[in-house]
């Protein structure tokens, strides 16, 4: 056995107890103590901590949940949509000493169930459920269309349709609260982008030779991320900055229309070519994806921004 293996064998492994949240805190403290006392590298301690937590949570799942086949209890056709009552493929056992210290009472189990119910209402979880049922709808339509008649290669290709549409075409409706957020924050971002355009024009008058890298540096100084958190999303757009339609901008000598009759992205040094509304929509899309875990449609975001009061 190597010396390093022997050392790892002698290091105590974190074995947390109590509720999962408390267990995680306790395990982290134990790992910090192990690192300080033994002088081991953080990566080695992390591996040991992960092994201990894996055993703990595995035991929790084995102890707490009994698994059974999932079952759809009822489906009602409501015309525009379907109502579905679904029984989860697991359930909680009766309270007992074997259920773990944090599930020995009925009130503790009720608290856990309600917590899980609230978790299922989170946007990112709802999105996963939406994607799951959309995929099942796509498979049903393929079966209805007789996909089994074709070769395995053709079937494999067709089954990717749902994934492609989910990846490229957001289908989540924007509720009233999100629409208000887009209207409020979007207007402020739009005004700031307009102010950025004026700033760039001033910099160009002061230094006609200023280039995009210098302008980018000035923008970071004038509009810091600490004050404008959405600037990180604007920065990601710089290589492909949305521009106005070609008929509303003067075509520069270095700009070449491609085969698809589209101009290249706008440059930082040409703020009059920027499409503020499209830039603002993409910034809001990135911000909402970070905040809500949902990628909303650019078209829907743009429609709200165009009708928002200034």
Image (tube, rainbow, N blue to C red):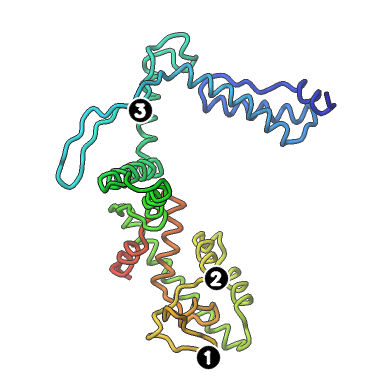
Q: Is residue 190 left or right of residue 34?
A: left
In the rendered structure, are the residues bearing label 2 and label 1 in contact, judged by CB atoms less than 8 Å apart? Answer: no
Q: Residue furthest top?
A: 97
Q: Tag 3's secondary structure? A: helix
Q: Nearer the viewer, residue 74 or 179?
A: 74
Q: Which residue is mark 3?
A: 114
Q: Tag 1's secondary structure? A: loop
Residue 239, labelled with which disc? Answer: 2
Q: Which residue is mark 1?
A: 253
Q: Residue at x 78, y 27 (%)?
A: 37
Q: Nearer the viewer, residue 136 or 284?
A: 136
**Residue 30 picture quarter:** top right
Q: Is residue 240 left or right of residue 11?
A: left
Q: Position of residue 80 (x, y in %)?
A: 17, 47
Q: Position of residue 81 (x, y in %)?
A: 20, 44
Quarter of the image for the N terminus: give it: top right
Dot 1 alpha-carbon crowd within 10 angstroms: few under 14, some 14 to 19, many 20 or more? few
Quarter of the image for the C terminus: give it: bottom left
How many angstroms separate mark 2 from mark 1 (CA)? Answer: 20 Å
Q: Tag 2's secondary structure? A: helix
In the rendered structure, are the residues bearing label 3 and label 1 in contact, judged by CB atoms less than 8 Å apart? Answer: no
Q: Residue furthest right?
A: 3
Q: Nearer the viewer, residue 293 or 6?
A: 6
Q: Nearer the viewer, mark 2 or mark 3?
A: 2
Q: Position of residue 67 (x, y in %)?
A: 40, 21
How many angstroms separate mark 2 from mark 3 (CA)? Answer: 46 Å
């Amino acid at each position: 056995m190597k010396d390093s293996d022997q050392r790892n064998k002698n290091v105590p492994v974190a074995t947390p107890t109590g509720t999962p949240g408390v267990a995680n805190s306790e395990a982290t403290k134990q790992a910090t103590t192990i690192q300080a006392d033994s002088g081991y590298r953080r990566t080695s301690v992390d591996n040991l901590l992960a092994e201990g937590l894996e055993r703990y949570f595995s035991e929790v799942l084995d102890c707490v949940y009994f698994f059974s086949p999932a079952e759809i209890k009822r489906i009602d056709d409501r015309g525009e949509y379907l109502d579905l009552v679904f029984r989860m493929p697991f359930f909680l056992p009766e309270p007992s000493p074997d259920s773990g210290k944090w599930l020995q009472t009925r009130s503790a189990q009720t608290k856990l169930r309600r917590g899980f119910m609230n978790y299922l209402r989170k946007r990112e979880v709802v999105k996963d459920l939406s994607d799951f049922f959309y995929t099942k709808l796509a498979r049903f339509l393929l079966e209805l269309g007789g996909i089994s008649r074709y070769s395995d290669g053709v079937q494999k290709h067709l089954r990717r349709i749902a994934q492609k549409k989910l990846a490229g075409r957001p289908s989540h409706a924007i509720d009233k609260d999100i629409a208000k957020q887009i209207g409020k924050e979007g207007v402020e971002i739009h005004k700031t982008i307009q102010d950025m355009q004026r700033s760039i024009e001033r910099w160009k008058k002061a230094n006609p030779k200023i280039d995009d890298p210098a302008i980018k540096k000035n923008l970071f100084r004038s509009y810091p991320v600490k004050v404008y958190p959405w600037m990180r999303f604007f920065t990601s757009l710089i290589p492909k900055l949305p521009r106005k339609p070609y008929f509303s901008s003067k075509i520069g000598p270095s700009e070449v229309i491609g085969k698809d009759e589209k101009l290249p992205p706008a440059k930082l040094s040409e703020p009059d070519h920027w499409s503020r509304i499209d830039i603002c929509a993409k910034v809001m899309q990135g911000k909402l994806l970070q905040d809500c875990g949902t990628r909303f449609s650019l078209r829907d975001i743009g429609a709200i921004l165009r009708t928002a009061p200034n």
